[in-house]
Image (cartoon, rainbow, N blue to C red):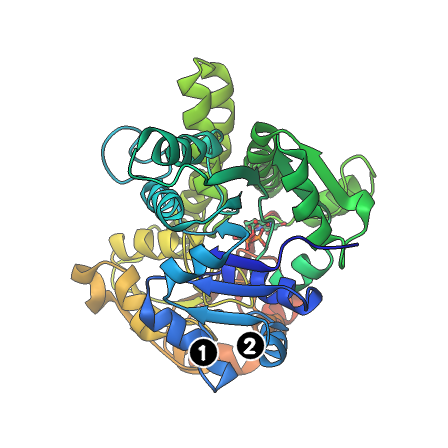
Amino acid sequence: MELKIKNVCCIGAGFVGGPTMAVMSKFCKEIIFNVVDINQKRIDAWNNEDLDKLPVYEPGLKEIVSKTRNENLFFSTNVKESIKNADMIFISVNTPTKKSGLGAGKASDLKWVENCAREVALYAIGHTIVVEKSTLPVKTAETIKRILHYETTANKNFDNKKTFAILSNPEFLSEGTAINDLENPDRILIGGEDEDAMNELEKIYLNWVKKEKIIRTNLWSSELSKLIANAFLAQRISSINSVSALCEVTGADVNDISLAIGFDKRIGKLFLNSGPGFGGSCFKKDILNLVYICDHYGLHTVSRYWNEVLRINVWQQKRISSIIVEKLFGTISDKKITILGLAFKANTNDTRESPAIKICEDLIEEGAILKIYDPKVKESQIKKLLPEKNQVNWSYYSSVLEAAYDSHAIVVLTEWGDFKDLNWTEIKKIMKNPSWVFDTRNIIDVQKAKSSGLQTWVLGQST
Ligand code: UDX
């Protein structure tokens, strides 16, 4: 199969662009991949001799980068030159939720995407396939298309021999498993209208993905599928979290419910773990986008439906902090509470939208003194997360035991493997009496904790 694409440029060297291009460079040796970014520091980190200093940590990533970097994978700030040389350009820049103006708090800020499109229009030569890779609200491809069209046809200063084909190719990477998700994807979505361009992108993937897994749709279906996939995943978590509260008051065990319903093939086993709520960079943002789009089209009942998924998520976090206060005799003012885990899930140091942060804020608001430990999240990071005025109300420790010393309660907020097998007898000895443990992830050995004399509360169980 002959590839027409010889040179690929990816604008944006972040969590999506870097690993995606690394995996492509591994499987497509005859293509040159240039990953560009305006952030010099980030590019330097990608080029660091010490592979442990790459700006993204993902299992398996450094092994790939060690083999393909400076062979057919290059990282630079040379945006202009790389666009010029490219037959295919991936746009993989960030699209944070807008902080102000129209759609503030819901819509994505497309500023970076728009800038990219303008640069592509300016520097591209000949025919270029532009692939939308960032998670974007539906109809963004239309914006990119309009900018490219306007810049190349309406603007007289431009070389009108430039042509573009726009494709949507959303990513479905999960933090911690990104390389595996890229190497063994459940599916690849290619949205577009231009058959030739779609064929070229498909040919790249066919180097390691089976044809049956490649789904071709129109642009809008591809863009919307990404939002809906995340909305459905988040919805499952809100559903099981709502059930956790019901289990606590009725005597059922939420783990049994997850197991029982997960055996139904139509439901499936994954994403049924109840916890303190979903976090991470995608779920909330994507649902907010979905809500915004529905409202835009006057589908207010639909937008309310999806908004409830977010409301349950906030409710679950509030519910947990209220239970902690209630169990500690209705007040936690000046009480020391140990926080185990701040990351939004295990095996990452990412704290974006972490439910643990919201719960910590609530506990601080109630007057507690937090003693925080997370195996990967650093103290300097926490300083940016928990409000300045409250910094006297928390301190950071580098082990579970140090964090547990002299505290009234322990709250497990991230499902780190280390927390599954804690020595409760030793921990109990150094805590205040009565000592409590609140497990919001259903991971501790409750029997051991109880027999060591701790009072326990476990999410989704009546204790
Ligand atoms: C998610 C999607 O999985 C991925 O496809 C998309 O591209 C980006 O968003 P990620 O944010 O890395 O990936 O994390 P994920 O593993 O999906 O977990 C999201 C949140 O849900 C975490 O806070 C996690 O703790 C929580 N979660 C997950 C649960 O509470 N219960 C579960 O059963 C699964």
What x and y, as percent, mark residue 109? Answer: 34, 40
Q: Which residue is mark 2?
A: 69
* Horizontal relation, residue 245 to residue 379: left or right: right
Q: Are marks 1 and 2 in contact (CB under 8 Å)?
A: yes
- Corner quadrant of residue 226: top right
- Tell me the SS state at disc 1: loop
What's the amino acid at mark 2? Answer: Arg
Q: Quadrant of the N terminus?
A: bottom right
Q: Residue at x 30, y 33 (%)?
A: 155
What x and y, as percent, mark residue 458? Answer: 57, 55
* Horizontal relation, residue 390 to residue 233: left or right: left
Q: Residue at x 31, y 57 (%)?
A: 332
Number of residue marks: 2
Is residue 355 at least partly visible in the picture? yes
- Does the beta carbon of the residue at mark 1 sit less than 8 Å from ligand 1? no
What's the amino acid at mark 1? Answer: Asn
Q: Depth check: 279 or 217 in front?
A: 217
- Tell me the SS state at disc 2: loop
Q: Which residue is mark 1?
A: 47
Q: Residue at x 55, y 52 (%)?
A: 87
Q: Earlier in the sequence, mark 1 or mark 2?
A: 1
What x and y, as percent, mark residue 103? Answer: 31, 29
What x and y, as percent, mark residue 211? Answer: 81, 46
* Horizontal relation, residue 23 to residue 269: left or right: left
- Name the residue furthest bottom: 50
Q: Depth check: 197 or 162 in front?
A: 162
